[in-house]
Every structure is written in structure tokens, then in C-alpha cells.
Amino acid sequence: MKYSRIIAAISTLSIATLSIVSCESNTSLEFKRYYSEGAEVYQTRCQNCHGNDGAGLSALIPALNDSTFLKKNKSSLACAIRYGMKGAITINGKAYEENMPAAELAPMEIAQVITYMNNSFGNQLGIVTMDEVEADLKNCKLIPGSNYLQLIIKPSR
Amino acid sequence: MRNLTIGFLLIAAFSTCKSNDSKTSLPIYGTRQAVTKIVDGKSVTDTIYQTIPKFKFVNQYGDSISNKDLDGKIYVADFFFTTCPSICPQMARNMLKVYGTYKNSADVRILSHSIDPKHDSVPVLKKYADKLGVSGNTWWFLQGKKEDVYSIAEKNYLVAVKQDSSAAGGYVHQGYFVLVDQQKRVRGAYDGTEPKQVDQLIADIKTLQAEASSKTAQ
């Protein structure tokens, strides 16, 4: 009786441990998949302007390494990529006011490229899933009469 | 056996000379004509090379820039527009390297011609240059009549591209950097989106500078 209880306890514990471990490896596998697909999206759709090192271009195109900005505006990133941006933003304490053109990407590609950006160039912000992107895309506020995102972007500093 | 070794050494010496020579001279692109003239009672045959014709544009400071301002200068020409989202930022990033290398050289200029003069007015070009971090008179952003810009691009600057490329049309948009020598002859064309080709351009400008100083020394 006593033994069976102990055995039950041990097996419950080991099942729990196993599921946690497998869960973790699933997450990291998913992350890796998003990240490597995102790297390809970045190369074909973002790199010309933002550079292969994400450093941007002088005062014309912002760098993508402002982790604070990316964290604060996490839920606006999908809309910004999908619809483009108009108006001034402050990145690394510097103002940028050029327009960003829209990149007509699918929600999955947007999630992948955000995951890539958010974990490259010195950023370590984890995965952004397609479900999150789809939810964010439902709340894009566009500038009336244009296809650009209405900037509700919060400065990093 | 000894003779053979000396022979080999001689061949080796000559071949290194030869490869050095080919590195220090750049091709001259465009059409050429042989012209025979009578000089001091003797007939002399000269080769006339195709050169960049007269032009007149306005730079980012509102100053008028003509072919005369490039007399005796080595320069790099390209074609862009400030709102171009595709290859232009990559070209600008690479041209900044050329600018960074030669901004203090009095004999080198960069001419970036806007192919969208309607939008790219003088103030727009000035702002673009400022934001790129370009000052002084090494790198000019030029505005002119659209037909003049297209004509000089296709008929003159991009002759080297046409000779090298089997693809037809659209040269202006392909992001070439064209190298022009002190006599306004086209000496090279480089893909402005390829960092390696732009490194070659930077090296070739040095070659043209050396060519000029060896001529004045003679």
C-alpha cells in the first residue's frame, strides 16, 4: 500500500518532469524555426534598407537594435511592418522621420521576421508567434485616408 | 640545368611584371576613332576616345555644376532618387565607403544624379545629404531635367555597362557606379549594391590617381 503510493508519486513526478522537458524543447524548436525562416524574410525584404547588421543608414534609416523601443512597442510592430510607417520616431535617442514602406507579408512571415529581429543585433526578446501577430493585426490603427499605420509608437527614452 | 633555372626565374620575373601591369591599368570604355593630323609637317595618328559631353545640373547647395567643374578630376557617377526604397539605401551605404575614403582628396568627386527631379528639389537633396552625413563638396547630389539625366546616363555613363551586360534596358535603375577619369573617359562600372565591387572601385580610383601622377612625372 505504502509502496504503491510512493511509486504513484514517483511516476507522477517523472511524467510531469518529462512533459516539462518536452515542452521546453518544443518551444525552442519552434523558436529556431521562426528565427531561421525570419532570417530569410529579413534578407529579402528588410536588409536593403536596414542593412545586414541591422545598423540602418545614417540618420535616414533607423537601426533595429533598440531593445527598449522594440519591447515597448511590441504590439505595434506587426502593423508597422504590414502597413508601413509615417511620422517621426525616436530610436536610440535619435529622431527618424522618413516613411517606411509597407511590406505585404503574411502573418506567419511577419511573426518570423519579428522573431528574427527581436533576437538579432543584440536584442534578446524571445519569440513572437503567428497567433500574437494575427491578434495585433486586428488592432492596426491606420492614418485616415492612407494605408499607413497611425503611429502610437512609444519612444524608448 | 642551371640555364634552365635561370630561364624559369626570368619567366617568373616577367610574368609578375605583366600581372602588375594589368593591375595598374584600367580599360577605356566607349567608341574610339583614329584621327590623323599633320603636326610640324609630319602626320601623327591619335586615338580619340569617347568622353562625357557637356552637362549642366544643380547640386544640393543650389550651385550650378557643369562638366567644367570636373576638369582634371576623377569622379564616380550614379543614378538614384531619395524616396527609392529598393536598392538605393544599399547603394548609399556603399557609396558612403567611397566618400569616407576620398572625402579629403581634392581630385575626387562623387555625382549622384536624381532620376526623380520632380520630387528631389534642391532642399530635398540637401536634407538627404545632411541625413546621410555628407558635407562639403566631394559628393554632389544633382538635379536636372529628367530627359537630360536619362540621356547622359544611357548614352554616356552606362556605355561600359552595355558592353559588359547582355541584359537590355533598365540600366539606370540597376545601381551602377561609373568611374570617370581626368579626361572624362569611362574607365569602369561597378554594381553599387555589391560591397566587393565597391571595394574594387575604391582601389581603381587609387589606380587612376597613380596614372595621373606618373604622367605628370614624365
Image (cartoon, coloured by chain):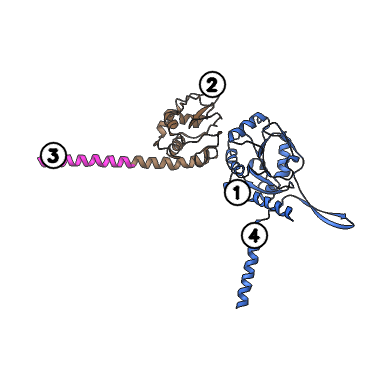
Chain colours: A brown, B blue
Q: Amino acid at mark 2?
A: Pro
Q: CA distance from mark 1 to mark 4?
A: 20 Å
Tag 1 secondary structure: helix
Task: Give residue A142's mark.
Answer: none
Task: Give residue B197's mark.
Answer: 1
State which quarter of the image contains the C terminus of chain A.
top left
User: Quick check: marks 2 and 1 in contact, CB under 8 Å?
Assistant: no
Mark earlier in primary sequence (3, 2):
3
- Tally the marks: 4
Check disc 3: other Cα within 10 Å, few if <14, some if 14-19, many if 20+.
few
* B39 in relation to B176, above or below: below
Q: Which residues are magenta?
A: A1-25
Mark closer to the observer (1, 4)? 4
Mark closer to the observer (3, 1)? 1
State which quarter of the image contains the N terminus of chain A.
top left
Q: CA distance from mark 4 to mark 2?
A: 64 Å
Check disc 1: other Cα within 10 Å, few if <14, some if 14-19, many if 20+.
some
User: Quick check: marks 3 and 2 in contact, CB under 8 Å?
Assistant: no
Q: Same chain for the residues at labels 3 and 1, yes or no? A: no
Q: CA distance from mark 2 to mark 1?
A: 44 Å
Give me the chain letter of mark 1: B
Q: Which residue is mark 3?
A: A5
* B129 in relation to B188, above or below: above
Q: Amino acid at mark 4?
A: Asn
Q: Which residue is mark 4?
A: B20
User: Quick check: marks 1 and 4 in contact, CB under 8 Å?
Assistant: no
Q: Amino acid at mark 1?
A: Gln
